Amino acid sequence: MNNARSLESRRMLQRPPPSSNDNGALPPYTLPCIFVISIILAFASPSSDGEKEGEEPFPSSYKPLHDFLGWVYFLAWSLSFYPQLLLNVSRRTTVGLSSDYALYNLLGFTFYSIYTLSLAYNQPIRDCYRANNGGHSPAVSTQDVFFAAHALAFSALGLAQIVHYDGMVGAAARQPISRTCFIVSSCLCSFATFYLALILMTGGGVEKPEQPEKASYRYFDYFDYIYALSYCKVFITLIKYVPQFLSNRRRRSTTGWNVWNVILDITGGAFSVTQLLADCASLGDWTGLKSDLSKFFLGAFSIMFDVAFLFQHYVLYGYREEADSDLDSSGQPNRRHSSSDP
């Protein structure tokens, strides 16, 4: 038995690095295609995001670059959801994907969607923003809106896969959430609910910029509420990758965690931050960075953890195959394999 295991260990060391032909992988020309499609969409866009309601548009010379950066990050981040979902379907299990990460993802994108859609389409909130920022409009692009809605839908689908394939509740659940995740998620949901309840009970709304003395609130309003949700999203982005990172470390494997998710995520994060900084520079208004801190930190934190995930996959654990991983995402013995182990 020991000789057989030694032979298998030597074979593992001789295996080539993980290829892009794994289940759920995308073709190697995915990123070039994203760039080409983004260029086409950038020049085909009819108008700039700011050209409405009398708001100042981006400079015409900058508009194609703004649209190009936006479409690259939107396509990369949107596509990043698909490899993991396809991998889960092909394996008929989500073991390897942290259920804590999936729940944080859904909660975070719920907050982010409310924030982004409000700044993009709620006229009183937009007016209030301009009144507090020297007449400048929110730095929210069309791609921000589409991405927020898409991310929310596919985060819900990913969590549904965990429930369907492995279960999250009950003694038989193979992917239960941790106590820490339950407490943090409960606190965030309670905060959002009670804050909204206080606004409704105090008759809060959005301050009329032209009549601030007649505002129907003093401390609680929807404008501050959506910013509070955006800060919750920033906090979730800071912590949501930690359970997945620790899960990979406990199992000493990245099996079940699709690397294309990481490659596309780091691409989207880089172009998202670049677009936000370029937008502020083109308008000469750096208050846009302050107004959209959630977008900035969403990209920055994603890049930081994606580098760590790539190191885990290609340097530390990339040569381990599924049969070598005997722990589930929570670090407990994997029932699917343990029953047949010698």
Image (tube, rainbow, N blue to C red):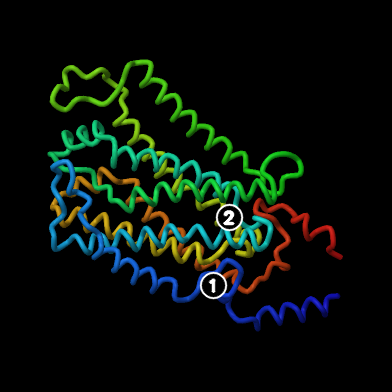
Amino acid type assigned to the residue bearing label 1 in the image: Tyr
Percent x, y for residue 219?
Answer: 29, 22
Instruction: Report the residue at 28% width, 42% height from top.
Output: 120
Depth check: 122 or 285 in front?
122
- Which residue is disc 2 drawn over? 246
Q: Quadrant of the N terminus?
A: bottom right
Amino acid type at mark 2 = Leu
On screen, 280 above or below 313? Answer: above
User: Residue 213 location in percent, x, y?
Assistant: 16, 18
For label 1, count other residues whose C-alpha is less than 10 Å away and answer few (under 14), some (14-19) or many (20+).
some
- Residue 282, compared with residue 128, is above or below; it is below
Is residue 218 left or right of 244 when viewed as pictured?
A: left
- What residue sits 36% from the left and 56% below the top? 300
According to the image, label 1 marks what residue?
314
Mark 2 or mark 1: whose residue is earlier in sequence: 2
Residue 33 versus residue 206 in the image, above or below: below
Position of the C terminus, as image quadrant, is bottom right
Q: Quadrant of residue 134?
A: top left
How far is mark 2 from mark 1, CA to CA?
16 Å
Residue ID at (39%, 20%): 198
